Amino acid sequence: MLLYHAVMDDPPEWIAEFTVSPGEFAAQLDAVAASGRTPVPVSALAAHLLGRGTLPDRPVVLTFDDGFADLPGPTAEALAGRSMPATAYLTTGALARSGKGGSLLPPAPMMCLEQAPLLEQYGMEVGGHTVTHAQLDTLPAAALRTELVDSREALEDVLGHEVVHLAYPHGYNSARVRRAARDAGYESAVAVRHALSSDRDEPYRIARLILRRSHTVRDVERWMAGEGARTAPFRDAPPTVGWRWYRRARAAARGPVFAG
């Protein structure tokens, strides 16, 4: 499962590390196609992990976080032109005009919430990415539920149907956050984990490989071959657990912040 953010030539500096150029993006999509992998939306993977469906022999899921301005235009067109379904996880508070609740994301060109149905017309599935892009594992219970429920309701209002798939901002989650996601009505949730997913992966902590500007077509080719990264599921490493406790302490002292 691949995780993209912005696809543009001149991104804001704060997201530049996680941005690929349109030309590199096209080359990476061509590498996915050449690998023989079959792109599927996250709903297909989630159904399989929950024992409700089957997958093609060599699936791959393409995901896009936040909702940058390129998504409902050239990025969706590049995917549709190759008949590649994908899943977009939208941070509702960051989307122009109708986004309610504000956002912790720094300024950047973003799509509008009203464009979410357009993504579906291009063959993209839409999931939630909270309201403000908060670090969910640092929030008290009431604030956590607000992030999960309000963003879902905002998307459902504009799309006219249920939204049951979630991406944790920054990939940050915990057992408590995973339970809250389930209780809020989500059927799956994706993290980051910098790992290959598998048919044994956890439905509420699905692993993704994040694309950085330093990644090349060769990296994508290796991932499509099942190489170059560990395979989920696996337990959190001690540094991950320690980083979580540090962020919780920082949030208690300073309040919600963008993790960068």
Image (cartoon, helix red, strand yellow):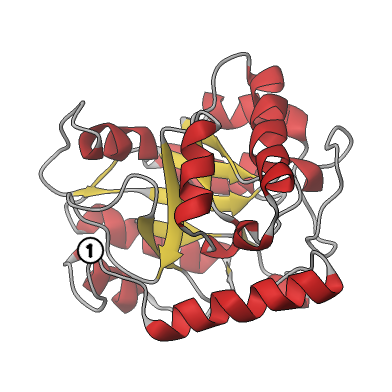
Helix, strand or loop status at disc 1: helix
> Residue 147: percent from the left, percent from the top?
70, 43
Q: Which residue is mark 1?
A: 224
Whether residue 222 sits left or right of residue 181 in the image: it is left
Residue at image point 46% right, 79% down: 240
Q: Does 97 appear above or below 52? A: below
- Report whether residue 14 is seen: yes
Q: Nearer the viewer, residue 242 or 150?
A: 242
Residue sitting farthest toward the top: 160
- Residue type at mark 1: give it: Met
Q: Does 102 appear above or below 98? A: below
Residue at image point 72% right, 42% down: 142
> Residue 252: percent from the left, percent from the top?
77, 70
> Residue 166: percent from the left, percent from the top?
52, 42
Whether residue 62 sits left or right of residue 45 in the image: it is right
Q: Does 80 appear above or below 140? A: above
Residue at image point 39% right, 64% down: 28
> How many residues crowd around disc 1 within 10 Å: few (fewer than 14), some, or many (20 or more)?
many
Whether residue 258 sits left or right of residue 96 in the image: it is left
Q: Quadrant of the C terminus?
A: bottom right
Residue at image point 48% right, 62% down: 25
Quarter occupied by residue 6: bottom right
Q: Nearer the viewer, residue 153 or 180?
A: 180
Quarter occupied by residue 159: top right
> Residue 38: percent from the left, percent from the top?
23, 44
